[in-house]
Image (cartoon, helix red, strand yellow):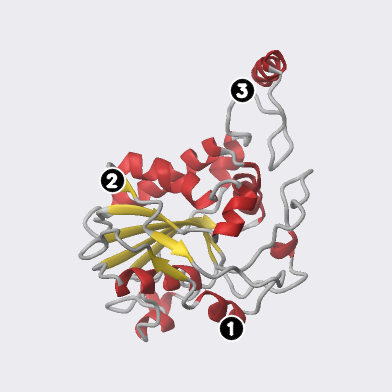
Amino acid sequence: MILKSAFDALASVVFPGPCRICDQPLQNASRVPICPQCLDGFVRIAEPLCLCCGRPFVSGVAAQAIEPLCRMCRAKFYAFDRARSFALYDEALIAAVLLLKYEQVSRLGDWFAARLAEIVARAPDEWRADVVVPVPLHRDRQRERGYNQAELIARPLAKRLGLKLERYLLARTLPRPPQLVLSRSEHWKSVRGAYATRKGLQVDNLRVLLVDDVLTTGATLDACARALKKAGATAVLGLTVARVRSVPMVPGSVAAARMPRGHAKPSGQQEHPK
């Protein structure tokens, strides 16, 4: 078994496989199975966007306001103080995120962490934090999967920022519903009150940098922020790899069905908007 593993590792270096997004042969051996062209091709989210939640503005009218905020943030709808995402959740980024989520490609988590660190570096005062916290999975899902994909991003991000990773600060106390796809209102109901801080851990006066893979409705970040602030956190700042341009994701949509080329979603794994 040891010899086979060593041979497989050597073969992966000598004969790198195809890019898992475009299927073109990889020119160089890499532990990130995506070609440089596809990595560079992710559609990064840029200005103009909502000052609070980071939602890209379709119209330039809102962006020209003295304090550019989307409708929900003008109404102070979210409990988190700030949120940003690296890129739009299009076909290519869906494939990349699912590689991380279902195949534990940890080096891809490192690459995503570097992109999120760039967001922090552009406005260090606004992103000042004391700890980095990955959005947790429910214990049953964590046991089933064996890892938390948000932590695969949060751990290297914390190292890059010189911050402590608090993987146990927050817990998901309620499991996700069994439905494959939830409506926007159903999802908001499913996550409200689903997170709590763990007893005995220091939360008072902390500025928390919350990390997840995808932001769709903002419901998950909002629910986590409410739990953290209830426990005394002074600020909750959210970073995600991807952001869905429009919500909700509906059954039968291209985005809901898209998977990495040549890979089917493992049995029992389900997608929900976040």
* Contact, mark 3 vs mark 1 (Cβ under 8 Å): no
Sequence order check, earlier mark of 3 and 1: 3
Q: Which callout, 2 or 3, points to the residue nearer the camera?
A: 2
Q: Amino acid at mark 1?
A: Ser
Percent of width and height locating residue 144: 64, 52
Q: Residue at x 72, y 47 (%)?
A: 260
**First-in-chain label (2 vs 1):** 2
Specify few, some or many for label 3: CA neighbours under 10 Å numbering under 14, 14-19, or 20 or more: some
Q: CA distance from mark 2 to mark 3?
A: 31 Å
Point out the image quarter for the C terminus: bottom right
Could you say which quadrant of the image residue 91 lies in? bottom right
What residue is shown at x 65% (from left), y 79% (from top)? Answer: 183
Q: Is residue 47 above or below residue 115?
A: below
- Mark 3, secondary structure of its residue: loop
Depth order, front residue of 27/265? 265
Question: Disc 3 designates what residue?
Answer: 29
Residue 185 image label: 1
Where's residue 79, x and y in %?
36, 76
Position of residue 65 in the picture relative to residue 113 (left or right): left
The mark that comes first in sequence, 2 or 3, is 3
CA separation in Å, label 2 and label 1: 35 Å
Q: Depth check: give the residue in front, 155 or 128.
A: 155
Residues tagged 2 and 1 counted as in contact (Cβ below 8 A) = no
Q: Tell me which amino acid carries mark 2.
A: Leu
Q: Which residue is mark 2?
A: 163
